[in-house]
Structures are given as C-alpha cells and as structure tokens.
Image (spheres, rainbow, N blue to C red):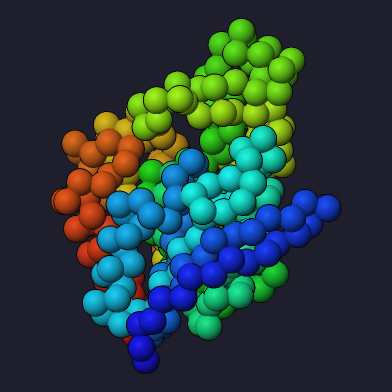
Amino acid sequence: MSNDLTQSRMKIESGGFARDIAVADRSGNAPGVFWMSGFMSDMAGTKATKVDEWCTGRGLACTRFDYSAHGASSGTIEDGSLSRWLEESLTVLRKTAAGPRIVIGSSMGGFLATLMAKALCEEDPQCPLIAGMILIAPAIDMTERLMWDEFPEKVRSEIMETGGWFRPSPYDDGGYRITKRLIEDGRNHLLFDGPLLTFPFPVTILQGRLDEDVPLDVALDLVALLDADVSMTVVPDGDHRLSRDQDIELLLNTIERMAAQSAD
C-alpha cells in the first residue's frame, strides 16, 4: 500500500457550533498510528512529525489532526472545551481508521485519548478501533487537578468573574488562556473519582521524572485506575515535553514494540 499523505479539512458541527478541523492522513498498513497533541500544541510539533516520518519509513498509516482553536483548525480558545475536542477526536478517528490504530496522546492528548478509549469501549467492550495506547505525560483530570486545584483564590475569582485568565507558560511568551468554559466543562470528564477503566488493549505510559507540568504522581494514579495490560517507563532526566533525540527514540521504539505485539 502506498504511503500517500492527504491533507483535508473535516467539518464538524454540534450544538449549533461548527468548526473546520485540519487533518493530515497518511495511507498505509495496519495497525497505523493516531496522534493526539497537547493543549495549545498542534500536529506540526516535533514528536508528531517524527512519528509521521517513522510511519512513512515503515509503510504504516498515520493520522494527525488539530483540535479546534489549535494549529490550522478553525475556532478560538474561548469556544474550546474538552467536550468539543473529544467529539472532534472521535469523529476524526472514526472517519480515518480503516482498522485498529495505536493511539498516541501527549499531555492533554493523553487525557483525551483515555476519554476517547473509555467512550469507545463503552460502545463495544472489544474496542475494535484501538490496537493500543501510548500516553506521554498524560494530563488526566488536568482542568481540575492540574489547574483549578493549583490556582490561588485570586486567579479563580478572575476566571469566574471575567471568563478567563492568561496562565504564564514557558512554551509561549503570551501565556495560555484558561477559560471558565474549559474549567466548568472539564468537570464533566473527571476520571480519578470514577470506576476502573477496563481496556482490552495494551497501554504504555512514558513519563519524565522532572516533569513540572504533569507530575509523576498523576501517571502513577492512572496506572492504578487502569484495568488493562499497562506498563510505564519513567525517564529519570525527562521533562514534560520528552522531545529530545533520546526521548523520540524511546517513543519510536515503544510504537515498534506495540505494532509488533498487535500483529501477533
């Protein structure tokens, strides 16, 4: 099968809210990869493009996309929410996956990947669209545990009274807009207070010990939450991004092992 890349825009509309989602879909063999980026990141990031290049070299299918208000997709962050980004993720996967995919989620993408897997497994316990998941510093329950719970009262008041607050970020000089919509909608998707998540496929977590954005304890709590074949690799000197050459090599080796396991 050829490894042609198709770039398109997928229109998604729900609740009277329409958005055009940018999708880069590379044809290829199974199991293929489905990439999910982090908050305010996009499919042109270092890890995403390296994964796509790796898939190309091995003739595997690979799909990347941008959530609304991210990258090349339409929308503003004021309209963004986990509910909308989850709906977009599910829609793109269903429309592009000819067979089971290895879903890779980075940071918020790891949270959304877990929510997506939960939704799919509730529809069908065999979860035929997912061959496995690789979660990179998965920001589970991020809007509550990593944002709201950590914000001082002054910041919480500003969000509630004005609709949002610009959170300083080492990755963007202007900071990231954290909205009231994002926080309130996030409470509909919290996982840590819920039941175990039963997944019929392998899950691998890659976590930097020096991650200041998503601490190691979040990944450990996720391991305890999963009823699945789960493993975790802790990178002793790794930060949140895990985008150094050695980190990329670890990721690609992990994909290769999971792809081989899927083929058995």
Seen in the image, is 119 located left or right of residue 255? right
Left-right relation of 144 to 253: right
The quarter of the picture where residue 249 lies is bottom left
Q: Is residue 173 visible?
A: yes
- Who is closer to the viewer here, 69 or 206? 69
- For this rendering, which residue is in front, 191 or 42? 42
Which residue is at a point 78% across and 57% down the rendered structure image? 14
The percent position of residue 147, horizontal first and vertical second, equals 54, 26
Q: What residue is rendered at 44% in x and 37% in y? A: 218
- Where 176 falls versus 165 (above or below)? below
- Residue 94: where, in percent of width, then height? 61, 73
Task: Locate residue 188, reporting x and y percent.
Answer: 72, 41
Q: Above or below — where is 255 with respect to 189? A: below
Farthest top residue in view:
154
Image vertical order of residue 9 relative to residue 208, above or below: below
Left or right position of 249 against 182: left
In the image, residue 108 above or below residue 122: above
Residue at 24 percent of width and 77 percent of height: 57
Please identify the residue farthest to the right as the structure is shown: 16
**The N terminus lies in which quarter of the figure?**
bottom left
Residue lying farthest to the left in this orientation:
246
Tell how many labels: 0
Front-most of 126 and 249?
249
**Residue at 45%, 50% in the rendered image:** 42
Write down the quadrant of residue 155 in the picture: top right
Quadrant housing the C terminus: bottom left
Q: In this rendering, does residue 149 appear at all?
A: no
18 displayed left or right of 193: right
Instruction: Pick whichever, 13 or 38, lies toward us.
Output: 13
The image quadrant that residue 185 belongs to is top right
